[in-house]
Image (cartoon, helix red, strand yellow):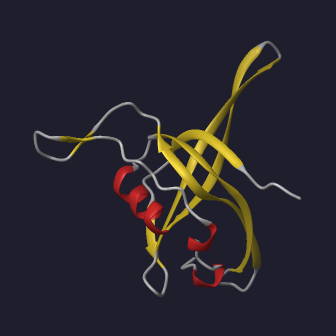
Amino acid sequence: MSINKVFLIGRLGADPEIRYTLDGKPVAVFRIATNEVIIKNGEKEVLTEWHRIVAFGRLAEICGEYLNKGARVYVEGRLRTRKFEDKQGNIKYVTEIVAQNLQILDRKTFSSGSSSTKELPTFPQVEEENLIDEEDLPF
């Protein structure tokens, strides 16, 4: 038996990028930063780690609609390392978190441009069978 589970709380470094597979399925890609404070030679030092997050399907659509740079989020998912060939023909590897659950942690509501506001969305739990095959990824 093995477990591949990741839990992160961090802030988005930029708005999510939404792409579509060849058959029109949405894919959201964004990065979040997590911080760790350490004491080095009596001085506090903040170490920042950046994490690449990928969301598929309805979760990707919701990320594109509600997430913005600076948003504080909880991401639950699994690690995946992909191998690809760049434009120069070099083999590259990328490690990313495939999001399966996501929550916005900021306690504000979102303005819809009128006098009404929208409450924070409920993000769907992603089932394994709904994930997209690596061959279909647009990147």
Q: Position of residue 82 (x, y in %)?
A: 73, 72
Q: Is residue 66 above or below residue 42?
A: below
| Number of numbered callouts drawn | 0
The residue lying toward the viewer, choosing from 22 and 100, is: 100
Q: Is residue 33 above or below residue 31?
A: above
Which residue shows up at 59% across the image and 57% down it? 99
The residue lying toward the viewer, choosing from 32 and 90, is: 32
Residue reaching furthest right? Answer: 1
Q: Is residue 79 left or right of residue 113?
A: right
Residue reaching furthest top? Answer: 42
Q: Quadrant of residue 58?
A: bottom left
In the picture, which quadrant includes the C terminus? bottom right
Q: Is residue 36 above or below residue 117?
A: above
Which residue shows up at 81% across the image and 54% down it? 3
Residue reaching furthest left? Answer: 115
The residue lying toward the viewer, choosing from 67 and 3, is: 3
Q: Position of residue 80 (x, y in %)?
A: 73, 64
In the picture, which quadrant includes the N terminus? bottom right
Which residue shows up at 43% across the image and 56% down it? 63
Q: Is residue 101 left or right of residue 92?
A: left
Which residue shows up at 48% across the image and 87% down it? 22
Q: Quadrant of residue 119?
A: top left
Q: Is residue 119 above or below residue 64?
A: above
